[in-house]
Image: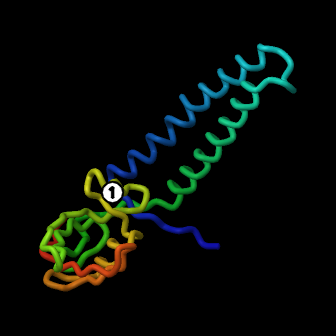
Amino acid sequence: MSAKISYYTKEGLEKLKNDLNQLKTKGRADIARQIAEARDKGDLSENAEYDAAKDAQGHLEARIAKLEESLGNAREIDESQLDTSVVSILSKVTIKNKKNGASFTYTLVSEEEADLKQFKISTQSPIGQGLLGKEKGDTAKIKTPAGEIEFEIVKIEL
């Protein structure tokens, strides 16, 4: 199986590195302390705190492994090389719903950086996939759980 390359902004890549560092240092230290405290409470075969701490350790190590894999497959995007004539990753796209006239502006980012509150949507999402490769003035027909919606590409920028 080949590794899935993910593209990140400089900020997104730094956040990924910082999250990994935080989990490896503070996260592991906290879990080790919890395990030590639970171990001090006696018989490990009937110690629910110990079991919970070991379980939390397993989840932490799995998260660390996932972040390390993501970081290993991460590539930083050179914004100076991006073409604003078509929608691509890092494009800031203004779209207009052709049915109700509502306009939205989204930035297309990697799945890991997506945050709807900041109007950042994943290139893997239905809307993101429907917008990729479109030019200003094009219509994107996007299948959503509520049915197919047509969006007009109003503006593309970085």
Residue at the spot 38% in from the left edge and 46% down from the top edge: 14
Q: Is residue 129 visible?
A: no
**In the image, residue 29 above or below residue 65:** above
- Quadrant the C terminus occupies: bottom left
Q: Quadrant of the N terminus?
A: bottom right
Q: Nearer the viewer, residue 108 or 103?
A: 103
Q: How many marks?
A: 1
Place of residue 67 in the rendered image (x, y in percent of width and height, measured from the top left): 54, 50
Vertical order, 18 against 4 (above or below)? above
What residue is drawn where x is 15% and y is 80%?
A: 136
Q: What residue is shown at x 21% (from left), y 78% (from top)?
A: 151
Name the side, left or right, on which 97 lies relative to 130: left
Q: Residues within 10 Å of mark 1 (few under 14, many from 20)?
A: some
Q: How is the image coloured?
A: rainbow
Q: Quadrant of residue 145?
A: bottom left
25 lies above or below 135: above
Residue 25, image x, y percentages: 55, 31
Q: Which residue is mark 1?
A: 9
Amino acid type indicated by mark 1: Thr
> Is 128 left, or right, of 124 in this rendering?
left
* Front-lying residue, 79 or 60: 60
Per the image, label 1 sits on a secondary structure element best described as: loop
Q: Is residue 147 visible?
A: yes
Query: Which corner quadrant of the image does residue 40 belong to?
Result: top right
Expressed as whole percent of the image width and height from the top left, the position of residue 11 reads 32, 49
Say whether residue 16 is left or right of residue 154. right
Above-or-below relation of 36 to 156: above
Question: Residue 107 in the image: x percent, y percent?
Answer: 25, 62
